[in-house]
Image: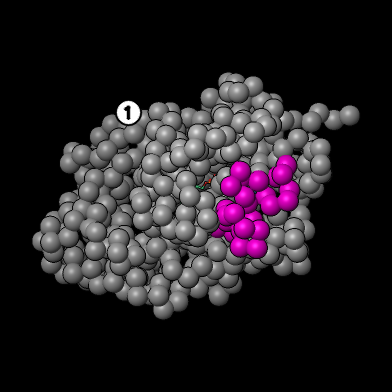
Amino acid sequence: MAEIYDYVIIGSGPSGSVLAHYLTQAGARCLMLEAGKEYAADTFPRNEMHANTQLMWNGGMDASRDASLLFLRGKVLGGGSIINQCLLDRFDDDALDDWAARSGIHDFSTVAMARHYDEVESHLALHTMTRADWNRNAELYVDGFERCGMQWAPLRRGQKDCGLGNDCMVCLGGCPRDSKQSMLVTFLRQARQQGLRVETGFEVGQVIHGARHVTVFGRQNGQSRQVYGRKCILAAGALGTTQLLLNSGLGDRLPALGQQFNCHPQLMNVALFDDFVDAHKGAFQAVKSNDPRFRKQGFKLENVFAGPIAMALLAPGYGLAHQRFMQQYRHMACIEVAVRDATPGAIAIDAQGRLKITKTMHDADWQRANAGLHAVDAIFGVLGAREIMKSPIRIGLHLMGGCVIGDNGRHSVVNPAFEVHDHPNLLIADSAIFPSAPGINPSLSIMALAHRASEVWLGSYQTPATTAPLMAEASL
Ligand SMILES: Cc1cc2nc3c(=O)[nH]c(=O)nc-3n(C[C@H](O)[C@H](O)[C@H](O)COP(=O)(O)OP(=O)(O)OC[C@H]3O[C@@H](n4cnc5c(N)ncnc54)[C@H](O)[C@@H]3O)c2cc1C
């Protein structure tokens, strides 16, 4: 008889890795399956094109059905934490109160989550950006904000001994210094030391739920594989986890499966200045908008930039006009509008089991986006930009929902104990369970939720109000 693990964990991003750490720490035998490959500081691809093709699903070209939105997600050991910017924020009352109202779960609150944030943060090196970290793009951003009477704040980033003067934009293709606090250098490393077994290049196609164990079917290096867990944790991200449940035939039994897909659509705006900006040099992002009016209006302004390939994608056209645009690379400043989406989309599959993502920005989303674009025009205008270019491309980096959490089987997929309704051996605590778009960077909250889920499954979770354990029986 093949080995039955206590937990088979599908996916190695913030959710899978944090869960692997706490479960192995408690003595559970865990197997992690990851579709992507394993890289390290000295083996990450060294140019932007190879990073896109080797570290992302479909080379970073997943699109909505109407091609109005592009979705980026990691396919690599460590998941999105390898290719993300590692900006780590806690959710505020606004985001968590909305979750409590939508899910019917009352201990979604900043007070109830504080313990979980404290715990996961204790494993991460966190750096609040200082003025010394600013490049010219950040200086322009702050200058524009102050002249327009808008509020800004320093960003908090997971990084260790990064040093000043690094061109840290390259670490969006995997950090070559092991400075960025990806899962590879934090939770996953600890979990491996505690006995986690990891198999990479293993793409799971289906899970079959049984009363005593879950069978996990997939392919690795062209071979069919089957593994078993008493419990199976789906930590494949909003798109991956939802696709897996749909491909496992659970769509008929879970009416909310695939619903409430959100992505914080991001709209990049480039301004050209006469002087060099060199936004690709130094800290890639150092400051953020912190204006309560923006939060109310449902958008954020991000101080960002991108490598030459990504910047080239933003400009429409080709030939000489496009070449002239790219020749301005060193003169470009960039501010992105990130929308807290008001209109969720849906995730489905076609007859071959491939993703079909319906997500379009509707009027309410455009009102939010346009308020942000208006603020960007004001900022670049007061700074004396020579030209402002609004990219027609909208990008989704924070992919959330599809298997939302709630106390009601008709409107949600996962119950308050992080189990799929009526399938107690299928567990989910990744970004797929988000009931709505928080409008805030999600990965620290994914880690905090994973910590909370591990306590629930291990039988040690205490609800803040009653101190009664949510699940009496430990699953070990
Ligand atoms: C460019 C970029 C920048 C970002 N910047 C930030 C930021 O600064 N701050 C922030 O908070 N968030 C940021 N994010 C978002 C953040 O990275 C994600 O929200 C987070 O990684 C999601 O975590 P997760 O564990 O839910 O899923 P993921 O990190 O997506 O991990 C899922 C893993 O499951 C694997 N998988 C999927 N399907 C299967 C399958 N069938 N079989 C086996 N394995 C599978 C995937 O390959 C992947 O490795 C950024 C994202 C991108 C793309």
- The location of residue 103, given as percent across then percent down, is 53, 56
Which quadrant of the figure contains the N terminus? top right
Which quadrant of the figure contains the C terminus? top right
* Closer-to-camera residue (285/164): 285
Q: Residues within 10 Å of mark 1 (few under 14, many from 20)?
A: few
Pointer 1: what residue? 161
* Closer-to-camera residue (37/302): 302
Magenta includes 414? yes
Residue ranking furthest to the front = 466
Q: Is 355 placed left or right of 294 in the picture?
A: right
- The location of residue 303, given as percent across then percent down, is 28, 54
Residue ranking furthest to the right = 1
The residue lying at 41 percent from left, 78 percent from top is 363
**What kind of element bears circle 1?**
loop
* Closer-to-camera residue (219/372): 372
The residue lying at 39 percent from left, 57 percent from top is 439
The residue lying at 50 percent from left, 60 percent from top is 102
Considering the whole magenta stretch, tell me its main secondary structure: loop
| Residue segment shown in magenta | 399-426
- The location of residue 69, given as percent across then percent down, is 49, 68
One can see residue 42 in this view: no
Amino acid type at circle 1 is: Asp
Q: Is 60 placed left or right of 134 in the picture?
A: right
Q: Is residue 272 above or below residue 129?
A: below
- The location of residue 437, given as percent across then percent down, is 45, 59
Residue ranking furthest to the bottom = 363
One can see residue 372 in this view: yes
Q: Is residue 100 above or below residue 354?
A: above
* Closer-to-camera residue (474/290): 474
